[in-house]
Amino acid sequence: MAGEVNKGLEGVVVADSTICLIQGMKGKLSYRGYDIKDLAEKCCFEEVTYLLLYEKLPNAKELAKFKQELIKRRHIPDHVVEMMKTFAKKMNSTEALRSTVSALSDDEPDPRDVNIDHQLDVAISLTAKFPTIVAHYYRLKHKMKLVKPNPKLGHAANFLYMLTGNIPDEISERAMDMDFVLHAEHGFNASTFGVRVTVSTLSDMYSAMTTGIGVLKGPLHGGAAQEVMQMLEEIGWAKNVEAYVKKILAKHGRVMGYGHRIYKTYDPRAKVLKKMAKEFSKKKNNMRWFEIGEKLEEVMAREKNLYPNVDFYSAIVYHHLGLPLDLDTPIFAIARITGWSAHAIAQYKDNRLIRPIENYIGPTNLKFVPLEKR
Amino acid sequence: MAGEVNKGLEGVVVADSTICLIQGMKGKLSYRGYDIKDLAEKCCFEEVTYLLLYEKLPNAKELAKFKQELIKRRHIPDHVVEMMKTFAKKMNSTEALRSTVSALSDDEPDPRDVNIDHQLDVAISLTAKFPTIVAHYYRLKHKMKLVKPNPKLGHAANFLYMLTGNIPDEISERAMDMDFVLHAEHGFNASTFGVRVTVSTLSDMYSAMTTGIGVLKGPLHGGAAQEVMQMLEEIGWAKNVEAYVKKILAKHGRVMGYGHRIYKTYDPRAKVLKKMAKEFSKKKNNMRWFEIGEKLEEVMAREKNLYPNVDFYSAIVYHHLGLPLDLDTPIFAIARITGWSAHAIAQYKDNRLIRPIENYIGPTNLKFVPLEKR
């Protein structure tokens, strides 16, 4: 068979795209042509979602309307909340999100002529519902009363409110919002590619998002914030960093939250989030984790020429937000559904069934032996 | 960015494989080195599942043990049957299968060190449960009493029994079994590839199978038996075939169940199933659909050099089996989970995160304009 085996599809170009540009060597990332730093520091998540879905930044009127669209769709129907009670008893957080999203679908058509408006509608509905699902799961699991969505709050603040029952302070809202913007989109990562493979048979948006969550669940993909925080706790204090890194490198171990398959220099998302982590740490009068982070950067740059990725400073921000770390993957999904949706729409608009091939290296022409003679 | 855009990944080799060899130009298909004709005519589905999972044909003792393993796991837990009642009310058959499979998972770990035995265990459990899920869905939807699995019956016969409430006759059992064998595996088709993308993050087997079902749901993938049967009914009788094909070709339409992206000659699965369809049609004293099929073959070969694919004769077989045609995609899944599982295991054993790239053609360096100035 023709061609070399490329197990990871590294460097294989599977689509033209206008969604995001990742410049790994330069450490640059932009969505629809806008630098990630501007978007993270100057836009709310709803604005960025609009940009990714509609290919332009909204004006004030468009944004207000779009926010209302999202607010209207935050509610989870009662029959699905009933199922979530069982999910919360039996499942981890990512399984519960995957199962709930699948359960929300309702005789979804798969026509050969795709209705893009309908697909967008489902994408917006699920984008609105993801925070509700994650917050409900958490409160059901811990036998707490469910908190209804608050239509006065934006996407990020409302998520924190539904999770904790308290309206978040200004910096918490800003940090959560920024974290969502930074995680919204990142090209043909495995979960997004899984979404596009699903759409490529002209399957529906619920199926596509269910796939996205299932792919994101794996430890080689998303949400290493939990592992980063565990590492920070193990290190304990900045003075222990040198010894810790030496120990890990001696046994060829991994320093969590470091390095990235694409960024060979500083992850631009980590750069923005580091600033936020510093501000947040000061506000909370707790520089302990941030100081470990700064020292770790110094040592890892010197020893391995590796830089923190977006997960690293997410961990510190989540810690200050008081987020339960076993929610790190579903929180990633709350943000990434935006990118998944933009890619799904792009795939519907210019589709080709995705079907690579294998290089067969097994036996051929084996003689069949009937059961009684084996 | 390097490389040409290849939207369908045609000809891109993504893995070495020992699972199945498709020789599109020769019209040959083999699983693990054995010709599909031998397997379909001389093996039961359980035997072929064993072959795909364990890389060898079982002897009598191994097969008996494996059948028992499957029989033991056919049961669906009560709390999931409860959810299925809601699914049956609201969802189509493929959504219900996808949601039920996701709901069966139970705090499934995603360790960086994968336990292959555990993954195989889940694969076997789900293989055993798929027919129960599909049959339960159908009976719940039509408000019929659920039929418990019958441990005396094999995989195919038990499915028909749970669906209809009656123990099938010999030819029905044989036809269902053969159909499952023929649909069990087919290389890197989109659903199988979706399964492998999911596994490539080291996500779990439930996530992988949930993805598989979601990808299979799309009309460009699997289970066109329903559309084929609708076409046969529209044609009505063999004498109308010439006129029907002329009409369709004049408006550049599709003749359902014809042609295949890989087979450029006769689909070897269709060849085996055609023989079965003929035998079954005779037995049922109803040659009407088969005669249309034969005439259609003649006209399509002459006019378009196209041959029937596996879906074509599946439709006639399903008709004689009395299968509800809106179950065609989940029935495909009952068979294909075997191939999905074999590919998932292969991916776990020799994994690399699957992450292709895009060719960015959008705007760059756009100047950020604040909301109030847009």
Image (cartoon, coloured by chain):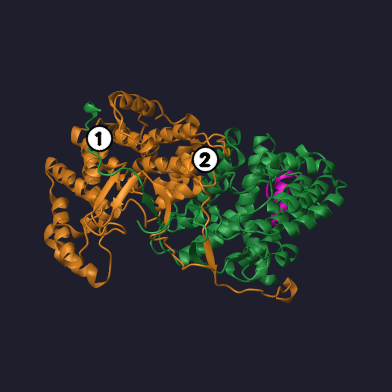
Chain colours: A green, B orange
| Tally of numbered discs | 2
| Residue A74 in sight in this render | no
Residue at image position (76%, 37%) is A234
Residue under label 2: B204
As shown in the figure, which amino acid type bears the numbered disc 2?
Answer: Asp
Q: Position of residue B173 (x, y in %)?
A: 23, 35
Callout 2: SS: loop
Instruction: Report in which chain the residue with disc 1 lies.
Output: B
Q: Where is residue A112 in the image (x, y as percent from the top left)?
A: 38, 62
Callout 1: SS: loop
Residue under label 1: B43
As shown in the figure, which amino acid type bears the numbered disc 1?
Answer: Cys
How busy is the neighbourhood of tag 2: few (under 14 within 10 Å), some, or many (20 plus)?
Answer: many
**Along the horizontal axis of the image, is B214 left or right of A131?**
left
Residue at image position (21%, 66%) is B304
Q: Could you say which quadrant of the image residue B306 lies in?
A: bottom left
| Residue B354 in sight in this render | yes
Residue B197 against residue A112 in the figure, above or below:
above
Q: Does the magenta stretch include residue B133?
A: no
Residue B188 against residue B172 in the figure, above or below:
below
Write down the region rendered in magenta: A146-165
Q: Where is residue A194 in the image (x, y as percent from the top left)?
A: 50, 53
Q: How far apart are marks 1 and 2 (CA)?
A: 30 Å
Give me the disc on residue A328: none
**Along the horizontal axis of the image, is A181 left or right of B291?**
right
